[in-house]
Image (cartoon, grey):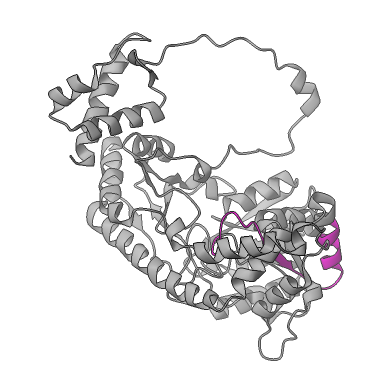
Amino acid sequence: MSNSSTQRIVDGLRAWIAAAPPGAKLPTNRELMAEHGASPVTVQKAMHALNALGLIETRPGVGTFTRAARAPRAVDFGWQTAALGSPHSRFPKVSSTQRSAAPDAISLHSGYPDRELLPERMVRTALARAAKSEAALTRSPVRGLPELQAWFAAELGGAAGVSPPTARDVMIVSGSQSGLGSVFRAVVGSGRPLLIESPTYWGAILGAEQAGLALVPIPSGPEGPDPEEVDRAFRRTGARAFYAQPTFANPTGVQWSPSRGRELLEVVRAHRAFLIEDDWAHDLAIDADPAPLAAQDDGGHVVYLRSLTKSVSPALRVGAVVARGPVRDRIAADQGAEAMYVSGVLQAAALDVVTQPGWRHHLRAFRNQVRIRRDLLVDALREHTPDAQLERVPAGGLNLWLRLPDGTDAERLVRDCESRGLLIAPGAEWFPAEPPGPYARVNFAGPAPDRFPEAARLLQAALEEQR
């Protein structure tokens, strides 16, 4: 029995539940099988979907019932008004990319690759070795294991005529999100302006707001931000830093051209400012190779971040910040105050994985497998979702950025898709100001690529329903 049959049962029961009083008993599985001509598995999937939506509750040995309405107990939280004081920024809700999915849902909302794409055997072996090493019982150096620092420095390297960074310029952090927080606090400072691409990574927006920064959005087009626009923003605001993702930006997939990167780096240098380069997708290349701007700068203008979380394992929250000069020590001091040090076991395991002979082979295989998934989802959307415009096919990263028809309520679209068993992310989360239109982000490296055509049809159905 197909997933469409499951959805018909879900839709029928949702209408029944809407008209039934709280606590009403649902028809039995046998009755539903007879009514819909469905198999036991199909009926069970429908019941799981309704349970995930919070519409029913099962009482073992008794039956399944509509969820009884319970009057919430009134609690006075007024004391928190004085305790918290006036907020210095708007803190968004937990990102839609982090919500859990029902077991049978098609998950295109996450920001991580499917588990099948990760080097699982290498990670498990590395963790086992690290657990038996001295790292399991000793404190890690504040700036990280020297061998891992040296690896990140060597990976970045230096362009012709540019001195490469040394291990001393590297700080190991607990993922790039932790590193971003320290960089924002140490480099910019509370109350100060930060130039930031729009759209951009939602976690950077959140981290900057939590650090109390004043965000100055810079529109980013198919080639990246306009250097003249960035120059005007520096002059207008007196900002001393610009946060950007030159390589496979999240969510748009844009990669700056070499000439655009050089122009923007010159703008930053002319204003004696910093470029905070988030190279989150360094290991996620498909049709083009990464070329970090940090490798072109030895004057201390680029503060560079890279993480292994996406390419090694979400369980290994290990990344690095590379910076030169006094700013390096200021960031290190903030990191020491925030986290003291990163787990030596995680660092040792991460180093083990990326220095194994199979690591480069894994990256090549990863690139091929992700290319296949990207192209499958692109083809499915073009065939089955004419109402969503794919502005570009990214040369790397994990995501497709979809422009929705004008007037689309993206938040409602996300809810409607979820009720059909499809999870996507609304685009508003990636804008530091009001979005210029409705967008959605979908992850092409997620699980179940064989269901991409079904996902595209479900998205189109939800769009048509709004229309």
Q: Which residues are magenta?
A: 310-333
Q: Residue at x 28, y 15 (%)?
A: 26
Comparing 362 with 305, the one in front is 362
Give the left or right position of residue 405, taking residue 127 as reference.
left
Q: Is residue 102 visible?
A: yes
Q: Is residue 240 visible?
A: no
Kindly indicate the quadrant of the structure image that contains residue 226. bottom right
Kindly indicate the quadrant of the structure image that contains residue 169. bottom right
Residue 32 higher or lower than 45, as above or below: above
Kindly indicate the quadrant of the structure image that contains residue 461. top left
Q: Could you say where residue 465 lies in the image, as x and y percent from the top left?
A: 27, 36
Q: Residue at x 28, y 30 (%)?
A: 44
Residue 259 higher or lower than 339, as above or below: below
**Farthest residue toward the bottom?**
161
Q: Residue at x 83, y 66 (%)?
A: 327
Comparing 336 with 461, the one in front is 336
Q: Could you say where residue 344 lies in the image, as x and y percent from the top left?
A: 74, 60
Q: Could you say where residue 424 lies in the image, as x and y percent from the top left?
A: 41, 45
Comparing 253 with 234, the one in front is 253
Q: Could you say where residue 163 lies in the image, as x and y percent from the top left?
A: 75, 86
Locate the N terminus and report the quarter of the image it occupies. top left
Locate the C terminus and report the quarter of the image it occupies. top left
> For the image shown, how many numbered marks are present on the structure?
0
Residue 107 higher or lower than 312, as above or below: above
Q: Residue at x 80, y 50 (%)?
A: 338
Give the left or right position of residue 255, taking residue 8 as reference.
right
